[in-house]
Image (tube, grey):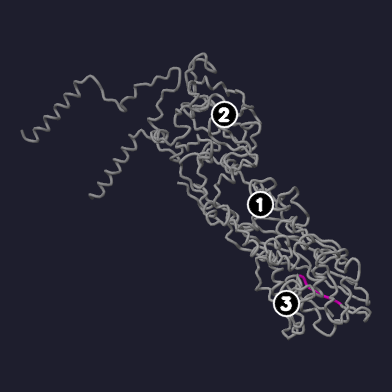
Amino acid sequence: MRAILLAILLFGIASLILFTTIDVSTLFAGQHTFVDIYPSSNDIDCVACHHRIQEELNNSALHSELSCEDCHRFTGAGITFAEGGSPATPGEEAHAAYKPRCLDCHGEGGYAKQAPAFNESGYGSEFSAHRALVLKANSSGMCVGENEACLACHTNYSVKIDYSYFWNINYTVTGDGTEWNISQFAYNGTREYNITYSKSGAKHEFVNMTVVRKETCQKCHKNIYDALVNGTAGAGGVNDEDYLTHAPIEIDDPQWAMYPDNAWGHNRYHYKANRANIDNSNYCSRCHNVNYFASTHLQKSNTYNLTNVTADTNSTQVHAAEALWCTTCHGSGKTKEVINDPGTPGMNSYGHSATDPDFVDLIAESYARTFNGDICMGCHEAAEHPDHGSCCDCHVPGMKSFSRDIYIESEPSGYCTNS
Amino acid sequence: MNIKGFFLFAIAIVTIGIFVLPITVSLFAGQHSWYDLSVGPSDVPCEKCHADISDEMQSGESGAHGNLTCAMCHRSLFTGYEYARVQREYFVGPQGTIPGNESHAASTVKCMNCHGLYRAGTSGDFPENHCKDPEHAGNCMKCHWAGWYDFISAGGFGLEDPTGRNPGHNSTDTDTGEYAAHRQFVLDAMENNTLEGANEACIACHTKMPVKIGFNVTTGAKIIVNNSYSQSHSYWDVESITPGSYTTYEEEKE
C-alpha cells in the first residue's frame, strides 16, 4: 500500500514538473555548439568520424606521417576548399575534402615521388605490363581516377582476379640441316584461372615496395608463379624433370653435371632448378624489370652485363614490369642473343641463329606475344628438352632432317610433350 | 490553546482574507505582461523556452555563431518565409503590422539558407538588402568578420542557391562540387526529412552533436582479365573492375 502511494506521489510530482516547466526538449542536443572554423585551415576533426581510417594509417608502412589534409585537401590538385579566415573562402570543386587521385601527388610534376611511366601522358609506353589495368581503372568509375589499379598493388585492398586465356598450343618444328621452321601451329581451349589475394582490405594501409615485389607479383600472378615453381610433376624417374614453364630452367639432369656452366659463363638458363628457394623479392624483376634488377644488384651487373641488357629491354620506360617477348633479350643483335652453343665439343650446332634474323625473331614476327614464350618453352622446358642421345637430331647441321610435334599447356600446368 | 483550536483559528483567518481581499488569484502569473512587439528586432525571449539551446549558444563552443541572435537564423529573410512582424517604412516590404504567413514567430531553417547563397564574382551583391532587415541590421560583423565582402557561403557541393533568387546558380559560378568527398552525404541528407535541407550533414561535421555512422565499405576489387588473341596478335583486355567484397563497421563521434 505504501509503495502504491509513493508511486502515485512520484507520478504526480513528475506530472507537475512537466506541466509547469517552461523548457522544451530539443532534438539532437549539441546541434547549436558549432565548431570554431575561424582559422584559415581545416578545423573539423576528420578522425572523429573516421577513426578506422586513422587506425589503418597507423598500421601503414607508408604515408602514416601524413595528415588527412595532406591528401584530402591537397591544393596542388587545383581544388579550392572551403576554409575560414578573414575573409572566408567558399569551396568550389570541393567543400571539406576531396577524393584524391594517387597520381595527383605521384603523377607528372607531382608533389611526391613520381610513379614511373604512369606519371606520363597516356600512362607512358605500351611496354608497361599493367598499362591496360590502369587504363581500365581510369574508366571504370569505381574509384577516382586510376586508383583501383594503385590500390590493388600498393595497399592491403584485397583483389580477386579472373583470368581467361588459352589452354594449350601445339605446333611442329622441323629442321632440314640448315634452319628450323614452325608449322601446324594451333591454339586450343580456354583456361579460366581465378585468383583470390586476400589482404586486410584496408585501402589506407600502404605496403612498402619490398612487400610489393616479394608478394604482390606472385599472388596476383599465381598461375605464373606456380608454373615456375610447381608446374606438373614429372614421372619421377632420374631423367624425368617436372614440367616447369614460363621461363627456361636449368637442366639438372646428372648427364649435364660435366657442364655446370654454359658458354656464357653463368648457370644455364635463367634460374637454378629449385626456384622455390630463391629470393622472391627479385624473382620477377630479373626479366620483367631489368633496369630495377641491375640497379639493385650491382654485384651481378658485370657478370651478366646488365648495363647492356638493360639497354636491350624497355625496362627504363615501364612501371613495375615490362611486357616481354623472348626476343626482347634474345633477339638478333641483343646482348644475350640466342646462339648455337659453340662450347659443346663436337657440336657445330645450327637452328637458333641460322637465319637472319634469328629464329626467336621469326617467332616474334609471326606469332602473338602470348604464344611466344610457350613456343620457346616447347623445347626449353627441362622436362622436355631431350636429355641424351638425340642432340644431333636438331643441332648438327647437315646431319639429317627432323620433325618434332610439340604440345604445351599454358600456366600453371605447363604440361608438355615433344616427340 | 490546543491544536484543534489553532486550526479553527487559521481557517477563519484565511476565510476572512479571501472574502475581503479585492483581488483574485490568476492562473499563470505574468500572462498579462506583454512583450513590446513594436518595430525592430523581435523582443520575444526565445531563451525562456529554449534554455538548452541558449546554453549551447553561450557555451563558448559555438564558433562562428556564438554572437548571433536566435532571430538572425530562425527569422531569417533568406528562408523566404513571411514572419509576423511590425515594419517601418524604410524596411523592405510593406509598412505596419505584417501577419505571419509560412511562419509566425520562427521557423526551422536550412543551414544553406545563409551558407548557400549565390554571389557573382567578388563585387558586392547584397541578397534582399538583408542589411536593412531588422534582425540583421547593425549585425554585419557577426557574420562578415572581414567586412561586407566576406562571403560566407559554404560552397564546394555544387548545390543550387536554396532561396531560388538565382535559379541554376550555385554559391558561385565555379562552385561545382564535383570532387567533394561528402557530396553524396549532403545530397542524401537533403532527401532525408529528419531536419531541414542538408542540415543533417552540416551539423554532423560542424557541431558537437554526437553522431553514429554505419559504414559499409569495399575491402577489395574484382578484376576480370581476358587474353584476346589470334595466331599473330594478342593483348590483355581488362574487362571490368568492380567492388569485390564489403565490410561494415560503426563510427561514433562523441
Q: Residue B221 appears in which quarter of the rendering?
A: bottom right
**Amino acid type, residue under disc 1 in the picture:** Asn
The residue identified by callout 1 is A147
Q: CA distance from mark 3 to mark 1?
A: 37 Å
Image position of A60 (left or right of A290):
left
The chain ID associated with circle 3 is A
Find the magenta span and give its range.
A405-410
Q: Residue A390 appears in which quarter of the rendering?
A: bottom right
The residue identified by callout 2 is B151
Q: Secondary structure at mark 3?
A: loop
Q: Nearer the viewer, residue B191 or A1?
A: B191
User: Taking B125 as reference, is A379 above or below it?
Assistant: below
Q: Residue at x 54, y 22 (%)?
A: B130
Q: Position of residue A112 (x, y in %)?
A: 63, 48
The residue identified by callout 3 is A232
Mark 1 or mark 3, which is nearer the start of the sequence?
A: 1
Q: Position of residue A387 (x, y in %)?
A: 80, 82
